[in-house]
Image: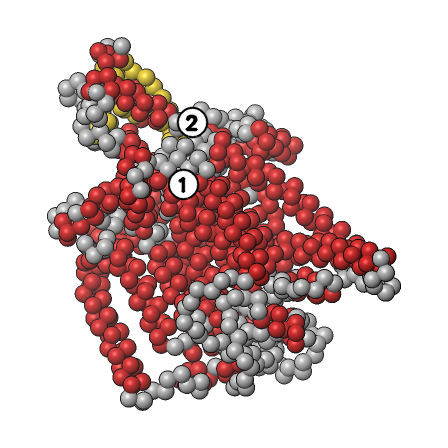
């Protein structure tokens, strides 16, 4: 048993074990022992007791079986409390380069292989797809930022036209990241001065690849096989791959969110300052990426509050613990006030949450009302001014606090490295209240450094590298939230509440099915981390379903925790099959050795029986069968129909390859008339500004003609060689210029049929349809059965719906209409069109 424990302790290369020594109970709970039997584990980890991962054993018989059994041990139930087992104290050493051991290489290799797979899927043909409308905005303003920073000092002027944070374009991180990629590619001498459709997406593909590797750092929580499965599912998920090849902010936010989870889980286990700093920086980067971080705060914060309340209740006993090993979870849960405290919190929080959402809804109405909007704008402006005035004083207060502590330590008024519990920590039981123990015993230097690092990230990005300090601080704290509240009434996308319940099952088969299995397993065999994953997933589904804006790229904030749950759901079957195969291999080797006379006769003992293994094998067969359409969906949406909106629900109002045809014509005319110097005048109507502001970035004689309500189709002065128009003015300009210009029409954007929307409201004497949509579809069930044109009095047909989905999966036959498009035209002057 001692030898096995030593093997377990050596699994993680980040822990250096000194020679054993006697520890006080308070010191002992700082670290979590990993032992063979889950029932021997104390609940000392604030999230959970880590699930033992597979140990590295050189034995070929019994230890091989024990390592597989250990990997499927459930984590310590969060309702059990045992005596803390003293473990060796972790000591810190200076950083030094060390040659990795064979065990470390073997541990890293599978995850590095999966990251390589993820990188290939994300970087292959990265620039083939034309830039989406939103991508063109991000690409253009990132290029502007790069040029601004070349004249950094000039951007300090308040009258400069340099890039500033604008919540319309979301957070400043992606612009700094893309601008950095541009600059690096320029230094490397890449084509087009390092600015093209590939380099725009490199940052997204890179962070999408990072996501694949992050489960490695929580393998103690997921199990070794669980972490590998999670990495694989994240690597091949259709939504994770597609939006890692898409220059939008959501994949950045997803990466930083998962990094926050990893860092906090590791900090709660290791109490390492480096993980707390990583978590703080990741949170600041997420906040600087997208305003949806407020939703993450709501989900993570409410779970944190629930755990704190649980720990407070766990201090008070209801039933004396008789240590009855046969007592079930219900009995264990009722030993303390913890579950009742959480129940009381829920009873109080539920009506408060309803009142809060109603208040937010009314506030959104208030700030969007024409009469009251000026008052709201004035109030927010004043709030930003007050915030900017207060922030320096907060910094001074923090500095004084740190100085006082340092002085007290210097004059020995405050003990340094004292293991005695002080302040609130004296009232906390580290075994029963592990999360409270983390909070109350956190060294001051930890939270100070975390705040400083997070604030430094915020300051650098929102002030655009200190060129807009006053505006950046005020806007960064308040303007994003204000804009997000305004957009809740706009409800961009105008999608029904069940949008994600239709979108996710169409693409994520293996993740969805085994994600549900994982939820069930987490509830049956709960630990704090498992319950957190369930809460994160279900909370994301609820809150993104509630939010007014529903877009396909938001689905990754639900599919990412779903993949972690799917890994938990698949892990027991995978572990059992691996153990079964290894047992048979070992038995075969022993039998062969016996036949050769090297071993005495021994009856083989199998831990995994064929009947049990058959169920696990059947589970993996089902997983493989579900993986096939998932991989098919990933391949089709990412490589075949990446710019084909009518055939992919995930492809939302996507720019078509016809944009490249238009640009080819522009280049041909420029070469013919202006020698290819890109000095040719080009007029672009307002409806076609994006993405052509990006594509025509090197044509310096381009004129963008703005439209107004009074003059939606203004006349074009002169006779420019090329005119690009789109949208509502298309027919008007065709009629006006068809005699002097050659007109060629194309699709600018196309989209998936939206017949799945609810039927529109039809005005009647009893219902004026005020506040209700007067246009829509036929409903999800009829749409799945018949597309957007069902027969009269038609009903849902399961057979037809299944056939339509099957044909879409394997043949990409669109379920509804494929004619939805937003058109454009290029007008080439007759003397240049010949």
Reply above or below: 603 against 245: below
Q: Residue at x 42, y 67 (%)?
A: 96
Secondary structure of residue under mark 2? loop
Q: Residue at x 27, y 22 (%)?
A: 666
Q: Position of residue 210 (x, y in %)?
A: 45, 51
Q: Residue at x 21, y 57 (%)?
A: 466
- Residue 296's quadrant in the figure? bottom left
Foreground tag (2 vs 1): 1
* Count of marks overlaid on the render: 2
Which of the image's four quarters has the C terminus?
Answer: top left
- Image disc number at residue 820: 2
- Residues at marks 2 and 1 touching, judged by CB atoms closer than 8 Å: no
Residue occupied by mark 1:
246
Place of residue 128 in the rendered image (x, y in percent of width and height, measured from the top left): 41, 32
User: Foreground: 526 or 700?
Assistant: 700
When the figure is inspected, residue 463 is found, relative to residue 326, above or below; the finding is above
In the displayed structure image, the side of residue 481 where residue 775 appears, left or right: right
Asked if residue 363 is positioned above or below residue 499 in the image, the reply reads below
Which residue sits at x=44%, y=85%?
419
């Amino acid at each position: 048993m001692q030898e096995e424990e030593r093997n377990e302790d050596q699994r993680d290369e980040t822990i250096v074990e000194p020679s054993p020594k006697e520890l006080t109970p308070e010191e002992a709970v700082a670290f979590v022992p990993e032992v063979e039997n889950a029932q021997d584990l104390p609940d000392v980890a604030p999230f959970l007791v880590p699930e033992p991962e597979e140990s590295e054993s050189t034995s070929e018989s019994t230890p091989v079986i024990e390592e597989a059994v250990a990997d499927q041990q459930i984590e310590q139930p969060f309702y059990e409390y045992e005596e803390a087992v003293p473990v060796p104290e972790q000591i810190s050493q200076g950083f030094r380069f060390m040659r990795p051991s064979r065990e470390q290489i073997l541990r890293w290799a599978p995850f590095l292989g999966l990251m390589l797979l993820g990188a290939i899927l994300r970087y292959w043909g990265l620039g083939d797809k034309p830039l989406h409308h939103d991508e063109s905005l991000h690409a253009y303003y990132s290029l502007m930022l790069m040029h601004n920073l070349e004249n950094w000092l000039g951007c300090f002027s308040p009258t400069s036209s340099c890039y500033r944070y604008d919540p319309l374009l979301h957070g400043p991180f992606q612009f700094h990241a893309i601008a950095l990629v541009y600059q690096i590619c320029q230094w490397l001498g890449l084509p087009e001065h390092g600015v093209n459709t590939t380099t725009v997406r490199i940052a997204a593909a890179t962070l999408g690849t990072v996501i694949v590797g992050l489960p490695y750092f929580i393998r103690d929580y997921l199990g070794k096989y669980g972490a590998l499965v999670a990495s694989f599912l994240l690597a091949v998920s259709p939504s994770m791959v597609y939006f890692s090849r898409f220059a939008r902010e959501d994949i950045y936010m997803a990466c930083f969110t998962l990094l926050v989870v990893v860092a906090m889980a590791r900090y709660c286990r290791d109490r390492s300052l480096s993980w707390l700093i990583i978590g703080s920086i990741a949170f600041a980067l997420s906040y600087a990426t997208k305003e949806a971080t407020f939703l993450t705060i709501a989900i993570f914060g409410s779970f944190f509050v629930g755990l704190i309340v649980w720990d407070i209740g766990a201090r008070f006993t209801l039933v004396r613990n008789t240590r009855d090993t046969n007592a079930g979870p219900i009995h264990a849960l009722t030993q303390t006030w913890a579950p009742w405290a959480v129940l009381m919190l829920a009873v109080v929080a539920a009506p408060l949450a309803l009142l809060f959402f109603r208040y937010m809804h009314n506030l959104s109405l208030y700030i969007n009302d024409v009469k009251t909007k000026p008052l709201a704008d004035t109030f927010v402006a004043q709030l930003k001014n007050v915030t900017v005035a207060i922030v320096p004083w907060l910094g001074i207060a923090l500095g004084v606090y740190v100085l006082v502590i340092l002085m007290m330590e210097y004059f020995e008024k405050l003990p340094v490295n004292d293991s005695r519990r002080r302040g609130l920590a004296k009232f906390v039981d580290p075994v029963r209240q592990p999360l409270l123990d983390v909070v109350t015993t956190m060294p001051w230097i930890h939270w100070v450094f975390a705040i400083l690092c997070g604030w430094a990230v915020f300051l650098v990005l929102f002030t655009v590298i200190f060129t807009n300090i006053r505006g950046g601080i005020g806007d960064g704290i308040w303007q994003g939230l204000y804009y997000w509240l305004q957009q809740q009434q706009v409800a961009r996308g105008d999608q029904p509440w069940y949008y994600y319940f239709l979108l996710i099952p169409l693409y994520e088969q293996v993740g969805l099915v085994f994600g549900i299995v994982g939820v069930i397993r987490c509830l049956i065999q709960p630990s704090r981390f498992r319950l957190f994953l369930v809460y994160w997933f279900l909370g994301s589904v609820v809150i993104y379903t509630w939010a007014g804006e529903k877009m396909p790229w938001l689905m990754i904030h639900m599919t990412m925790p779903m993949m972690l749950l799917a890994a938990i759901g698949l892990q027991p079957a995978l572990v059992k099959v691996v153990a079964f195969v290894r047992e048979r291999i070992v038995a075969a080797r022993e039998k062969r050795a016996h036949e050769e006379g090297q071993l005495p006769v021994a009856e083989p003992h199998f831990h995994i029986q064929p009947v049990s293994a058959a169920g696990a094998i059947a589970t993996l067969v089902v997983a493989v069968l579900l993986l096939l359409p998932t991989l098919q969906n990933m391949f089709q949406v990412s490589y075949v129909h990446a710019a084909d909106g009518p055939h992919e629900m995930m492809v939302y109002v996507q720019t078509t390859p016809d944009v490249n045809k238009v640009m080819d014509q522009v280049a041909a005319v420029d070469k013919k008339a202006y020698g290819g110097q890109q000095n040719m005048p080009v007029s672009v109507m307002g409806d076609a500004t994006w993405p052509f502001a990006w594509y025509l970035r090197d044509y310096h004689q381009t004129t963008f003609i703005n439209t107004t309500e009074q003059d939606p189709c203004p006349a074009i002065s002169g006779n420019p060689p090329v005119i690009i128009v789109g949208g509502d003015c298309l027919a008007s300009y065709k009629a006006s210029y068809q005699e002097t210009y050659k007109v060629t029409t194309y699709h600018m954007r196309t989209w998936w049929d939206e017949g799945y929307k609810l039927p529109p409201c039809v005005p009647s004497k009893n219902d004026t349809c005020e506040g209700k949509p007067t246009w829509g579809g036929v409903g999800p069930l009829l749409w799945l059965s018949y597309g957007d044109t069902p027969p009269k009095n038609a009903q849902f047909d399961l057979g037809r719906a299944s056939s339509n989905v099957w044909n879409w999966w394997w043949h990409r036959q669109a379920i509804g209409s494929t004619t939805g498009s937003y058109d454009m035209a290029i007008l080439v002057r007759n003397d240049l069109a010949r």
